[in-house]
Amino acid sequence: MVRVAKDLTLVVGLGVSGRAICRHLTRLNVPFMVADTRAVPPGLDDFRAAHPGVAIHCGSLTTLDLTDVKEVVVSPGIDPRMAGLAGLADQLNPHTGEPMVVGEIALFVRAVTAPIAAITGSNAKSTVTTLLGEMAIAAGVRAAIGGNLGTPALDLLADHPDAELYILELSSFQLETTPHLGAACAAFLNLSEDHLDRHGDMQGYRAAKQRIFIGAQQAVVNADDAFTWPEPPVAQLTHFSYNSPTTESEWGLAPHHDKLMLMRGTQPWLAVDELTMAGQHHYVNALAALAMGQALGFAAAAMCSVLREFKGLPHRSEMIACINGVTWVNDSKGTNVGATLAAITGIGATLQGRLILLAGGVGKGADFSPLAEPLSKCARHVLLFGADAPRLADALIGHVSLQQVDDLTQAMQTAFELAQPGDCVLLSPACASLDQFANYQVRGDAFRRWVLKAAQQAEGAAL
């Protein structure tokens, strides 16, 4: 057993967040050592060069004696209940009064002096976080944007020490190791099956997400999804909905002068036909961002200006090209059933033709059956690839025409042959990518390259 000295903080995980934790502790002159369960973590030599003299333990945490450790700070990818840490997870730290095992956001909260706006949800949190960030900047607020999206939260503190507002996307992994967030405004967008391999069941997953409301001054939640509502309630609560607003403070969609509008109560803010994001599911993303921005005091004109210009994020219902009257959309970020369901219903409702869905990968134990009914209404065909293609097929068979193929390339080739003018070929896998790709970005980039090449060839053939 390797004994960790009582004056040391143990950082577990040498990924992006773990390295940010180490940089933060170095700036604070807090002595620490590092552990990683991998025998040879990527970039180990670079880490040693950046942090000379810092002890590094590689391999199982069960060989560490943590009896005298000052604190354990885990990266989001590290389960605080894993072997070697489970005994500490329920103990309180005599120095901080918090649990002995915390995450990066706990350190961020201790150090931050400006207000926090925080966004979580199974889907759309990156889009809403980015929208809110651009709204803040357009409104003249010095905002720093990051967290689970882009720059790690602890690096934001160093990079933007004069920020007036920190806007953070937060995952369930980050929230479950955050004892107290105290956000000025916290939003929980939606809840659907994901990460059950980490949280055990939907109750555990929801409980982790609900931690975003601890100490929150204001909360923004989905009126159509009661699982997003805070328990216990937050005093200042704002709802957004696909439906018409039911109170003057609620945000929703309603007709006004023959146009469908983004509304706050009976007040129209923006016509949906002024939005440039693809798909109806982005209407509620816009409403969520408006609700948060209004709660934080952003100017209405600045927020609406951003919505008119914002085209969406890469890999999130990203329109790549139109080839022979067929639209090709990259939603590789659709790594769970809820995200894919939103893309199917949001895009399917806008089509003159039919949908061809490309799906598959690592399903993380999810139930794929909710996809069956909406696909039966709008899909021409479904092409399945990857490790969980058979499970997807079992859930969809009898509801929609489908075919299992070897990989994404074969799926795209088959879709090209099947698609008709007015159709949309949608890559929204409902699965993680790690069986065939390094991450969802690499999967989306492969889709984009293939489609752009096909578009170039089609253009050449037309000349």
Image: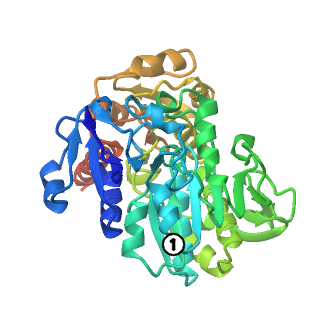
- Report the front residue among 339 and 155: 155
Q: Tell me the crowding category of disc 1: few under 14, some 14 to 19, or many 20 or more residues within 10 angstroms, Cα based.
A: many
Label 1 sits on a secondary structure element that is: helix
At horizontal 48% and vertical 78% (from top left) the residue drawn is 163
- Tell me, yes or no, if residue 278 can be seen here: no
Furthest-bottom residue in this view = 140
From the image, tell me which residue sits under label 1.
Answer: 134
* Residue 49 placement (x, y as % from top left): 13, 59
- Tell me, yes or no, if residue 96 can be seen here: yes
Q: Is residue 72 left or right of residue 51?
A: right
- Report the front residue among 299 and 276: 299
Q: Is residue 218 left or right of residue 36?
A: right
Picture quadrant of residue 418: top left
Picture quadrant of residue 343: top right
* Residue 162 placement (x, y as % from top left): 46, 82
Q: Is residue 284 left or right of residue 347?
A: right
At horizontal 46% and vertical 59% (from top left) the residue drawn is 107
Where is the C terminus found, in terms of image quarters? bottom left
Where is the N terminus found, in terms of image quarters? top left
At horizontal 69% and vertical 65% (from top left) the residue drawn is 291
User: What kind of colouring is applied to the model shown?
Assistant: rainbow
Total number of numbered discs in the rendering: 1
- Report the front residue among 56 and 247: 56
Furthest-right residue in this view = 247
* Residue 301 placement (x, y as % from top left): 65, 80
* Residue 219 placement (x, y as % from top left): 71, 59
Looking at the picture, which amino acid does disc 1 mark? Answer: Glu
